Image: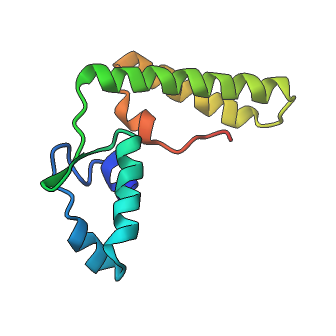
Amino acid sequence: MKRKRILTLELHPGDKVPETAIAKDLGISRTPVRDALRKLEADGLVNIYPNRFIEVATFDEKDIANLGVMRVAVDTMAVRLAIFRGSDEKEAVHLVTEHLAEFYKIRDYFPFIVKEPIIE
């Protein structure tokens, strides 16, 4: 839940993530919330400052560009695998290549990074 809110920028970089409020909203103890936040920290999505606060991680333009390049590489491989497997998903392959070209051309990688994969 928080991962999606972070990736879609509903929670902005630098926003505080109130552990207690999350637990209360979900009607659960703080332990599973802490576990989930540790996983988000391992993924680089939040920064945990023990005994102080938790905040959404900040990303600079270079970080976003690097993620975009990685997404292009992964989706390109997905297209190649679909073709190799003789997939009848030509329309899906066409959509992936269109999106790859569009995001690469405008150098706006963020929407592409958080988008669900077209081909699985």
Q: Position of residue 45 (x, y in %)?
A: 33, 43
Residue sticking out furthest to the right: 86
The front one of 88 and 27 is 27
The front one of 116 and 59 is 59
Tell me what residue is drawn at x 27 percent, y 48 percent: 9
Q: Position of residue 61 (x, y in %)?
A: 25, 23
| Residue 88 location, quadrant | top right
Tell me what residue is drawn at x 36 percent, y 69 percent: 31
Quadrant of the frame with the N terminus? bottom left
Describe the colour scheme in one phrase: rainbow
Tell me what residue is drawn at x 70 percent, y 35 percent: 91
Name the side, left or right, on which 16 lies relative to 39.
left
Looking at the image, how many numbered discs can be counted on the residues? Answer: 0
| Residue 95 location, quadrant | top right
Can residue 1 be seen in the rendering of this structure? Answer: no
Residue sticking out furthest to the left: 52
Q: Is residue 30 above or below residue 55?
A: below
Can residue 73 be seen in the rendering of this structure? Answer: yes
Residue sticking out furthest to the front: 51
Q: Position of residue 117 (x, y in %)?
A: 58, 41
Tell me what residue is drawn at x 76 percent, y 26 percent: 81
The front one of 70 and 93 is 70
Quadrant of the frame with the C terminus? top right
Q: Is residue 74 above or below residue 52?
A: above
The front one of 109 and 92 is 109
Name the side, left or right, on which 91 lies relative to 58.
right
Q: Position of residue 60 (x, y in %)?
A: 23, 26
